Amino acid sequence: MTMMKRRTALLGISALAFAASMPAFAQEKTVTLAAYSGIFQDHYTKAVVEPFMKAHPDIKVQFYGMPNSAQMLGTLRAQKASPQIDVMIMDVSVAKAATDEGLFDKVDESVSKHVADLYPAARAEGVGGVGVTFDNLVLLYNEDQVKTAPTSWNALWDKQYAGKVAIPAVPDIQGTTLTIIANKMAGEEDYKKTVEPGIKKLGELAPNVQTWDPRPDVYTPIANGQAALGIGWNARAQVYSDAAGSKLGVALPEEGSGFQINTINLVKNSPANDAAKTFIDYALSPEAQAAFTEAMFYAPTNSKAQEKISKEALARTAAGSMDDMIGIDWIAVAGIRDAITEQWRRRVIPLSR
């Protein structure tokens, strides 16, 4: 065989080998997951996304972080004609709005067998997705300024903390949850009937408030002593309180608290629909749920996950205090949220210092 023929033959073999490898590359699918940025993204990537990709090497998950559910909904609306996102994790009340607008497909047992094992609270009427995490509101305090852990939400109203309280105002759902808690403290259990007592009580709190818009979040100014007290979500608070040198304290008041539910949703007409269903199935599995609870102290929504979670981690989640939770129908709250926001703007925020 001449040198030219040998070279041609070798090139032919190389071309065949390259061509044989092409289908493997072509089969790899990318699932775009939209969810909360920051520490949620960091912990969810390590606890859930990376193990998923290891178990499913033919599927790549691209995490698209966004600061809140409202921005996620806006992105979905903008992409409705040609979706670029496959899976979205967002607050249940915003997920209801997205479902009503036809932006989500139904997540049921045809998508994931684990749906059958979810707690009843993880399934909300009229929401396409299902609960993937539970969280609850807690009282935050600076350990240098508040020497004894508060036992009541009434600490926020204590005059000694005038000008030292940080509260994320509505439309942030932390403010909405506090409204429902204040309503109960003022003697009105049925927030669907009226939140007038709660709004009045929050007006009395306003002079103590240093900021209604803590930056970059509510946890930082309390941890560094800029504020003495505030409210926040338990999961994030637990992570920040564990940081080296942190002065952030976390307390669940005796009056109880309210659940916040994050749902995992399948975007209608998503580019990688089948692969997206595979990811949702994994995210709802006991193993993935347990891993994320251990990593970031969100309570699991899968009832079979608890047996896989350490008692220490579970005790720091909402699952460790289920009896202390105020029942909140977030779908009903979505219908009165605008009215609550208007009352805050007229009768609460203007009364702060």
Image (spheres, grey):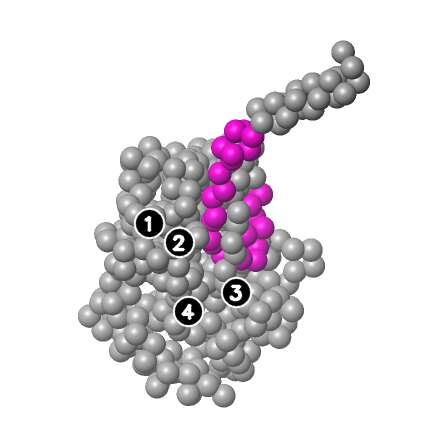
Report, in whole angstroms, how far the alpha carbon at label 3 lies from the one at label 1: 39 Å
Instruction: Check if mark 2's residue and mark 1's residue have beta carbons within 8 Å.
Output: yes
Q: What number is the disc on residue 172?
A: 4
* Nearest to viewer (mark 4 / mark 2): 2
Report, in whole angstroms, how far the alpha carbon at label 2 lies from the one at label 1: 8 Å
User: Which residue, as the protein is rendered here, is positioned at the far left?
Assistant: 193
User: Which residue, as the protein is rendered here, is positioned at the far top?
Assistant: 1
The residue where tag 1 is placed is 268
Q: Of marks 3 and 2, which one's residue comes earlier in the chain?
A: 2
Report, in whole angstroms, how far the alpha carbon at label 4 lies from the one at label 2: 26 Å
Q: Identify residue type, mark 4.
A: Asp
Viewer can see residue 142: no
Report, in whole angstroms, how far the alpha carbon at label 3 lies from the one at label 2: 39 Å
The image position of residue 202, as x and y in percent, is 38, 78
The answer to whether 28 is drawn above or below residue 87 in the figure is above
Q: Identify residue type, mark 1.
A: Lys
Q: Of marks 4 and 2, which one's residue comes earlier in the chain?
A: 2
Q: Identify residue type, mark 3.
A: Leu
335 left or right of 147?
A: left
The residue where tag 3 is placed is 140
* Nearest to viewer (mark 3 / mark 2): 2
Q: Secondary structure at mark 4?
A: loop
Taking the magenta stretch, the answer to whether it contains residue 35 is yes
The answer to whether 296 is drawn above or below residue 3 in the figure is below
Q: Which residues are magenta?
A: 21-46
Q: Nearer the viewer, residue 126 or 75?
A: 75
* Nearest to viewer (mark 4 / mark 1): 1
Q: What number is the disc on residue 83?
A: 2
Q: Nearer the viewer, residue 36 or 242?
A: 36
